[in-house]
Amino acid sequence: MNIKLADRMSRLGTETAFEVLAKAKKLEAEGKTIIHLEIGQPDFPTPKNICDAAIASIKAGDHGYTPSNGIIELRKVIADYITRTRGVQRDADEVVMMPGAKPVMFYAMLALVNEGDEVIYPNPGFPIYESMINFVGGKAVPLKLEESKNFSFDVEDLKKLITPKTKLIIINTPQNPTGGILTEDTIRKIADVIKDTDIMVLSDEIYSRLIFTGEHFSITQIPGMLERTIILEGFSKTYAMTGWRAGYGVMRKDLADLFSKLMTNSNSCTNYMVQKACIEAYTGPQDEVEKMREEFMRRRDVIVDGLNSIPGFSCVVPDGAFYAFPNITKTGFDSRKLCDHLLYNAGVACLSGTAFGAFGEGYLRFSYANSTENIQAAIKKIKEVL
């Protein structure tokens, strides 16, 4: 029997990092040594105090369902955290806790985007943006990030993309895959461009604590933008909690109620003991977070220097996250072929820039969430095969 799938399934994309990871694991199973620079996952353990809080929660019997939007204790902690770090007052009723940050993207599309509505998103950018836009029947409108502008963009170029059908703009700072940061000036110009429209903003701020130059600036800090912005945040990157699945959205209460209803219809709720661990993450000691940030900054310098020493490579210095995005056009390879060449012949797993959109051609993404020793070994192997 042939199954006739719904048309929307043909519009669903993927996250190539997991596909490359699977290829790399297969090679390792065959006895080959692979250096993993493909997956966007901190290689540090989750801080002990957070783990202890989860264990205590299990022992205390926190094994049942919770409210779909999250336990009130955690939502209050998150609201206080956002109020403190963004300088704008937020309330627990404006927070929806979710199993990871990806549901924030998905629910934003489901709640706001009708078929034919246009969504402007950064390209190269996190691939799930484009996938979700297409899945719900929207029109994905790529906004090119320019290497010459440190992977930012001219706001006039954004202005040219806006039409009467534009429903949502996605911004991401610090960025995946480039490590670029949108300056306060750029963000203020974005707000000015859309101030007289009904366009909503999805502000992906998941790397807000992983900044090496300056401080994080959120578009919600601009008067008039609070009610039209959905903040996407979480614990995965900052606290090395990727597998815990702990993310959240912060938005006006009427939208938060709708997101909570979407949670009820899909995931029911976020794991109880994970939520208790998240309370400890935000209220407990922050020493480990700063240590991780400092180590990522040291690794950034090592990998950027190393990549720039490879003939045909050139890499701008990223100001945030834990990704390097070198230009490889002078090697004579296209992105996908070079990505495969390095995996199978050098034993170095990275991602093709095209995994992040068409404007990623000519680039590779390296995650420096790996030891300095492994990064240096990877650079040596790349030089050997090139």
Image: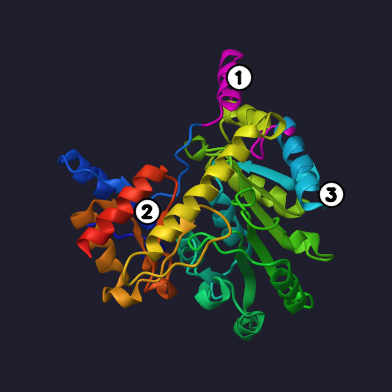
Secondary structure, mark 2, is: helix
* Residue 228 within the magenta-colored segment of the rendering: no
Mark earlier in primary sequence (3, 1) = 1
- Residue type at tag 2: Ala
The mark found on residue 89 in the picture is 3
Residue 263 appears left or right of 86? left
Tell me the quarter of the image containing the N terminus.
bottom left
Local crowd size for mark 2, using a 10 Å CA cut-off: few (<14), some (14–19), many (≥20): many
- Residue type at tag 1: Ser
Q: Quadrant of residue 268?
A: top right
The residue tagged 1 is 57
* Residue 52 within the magenta-colored segment of the rendering: yes
Of badges 2 and 1, nearer the viewer stands 2
Of residues 61 and 353, the one nearer the viewer is 353
The residue tagged 2 is 17
Looking at the image, residue 357 lies above or below residue 91 = below
Q: Which residues are magenta?
A: 46-72
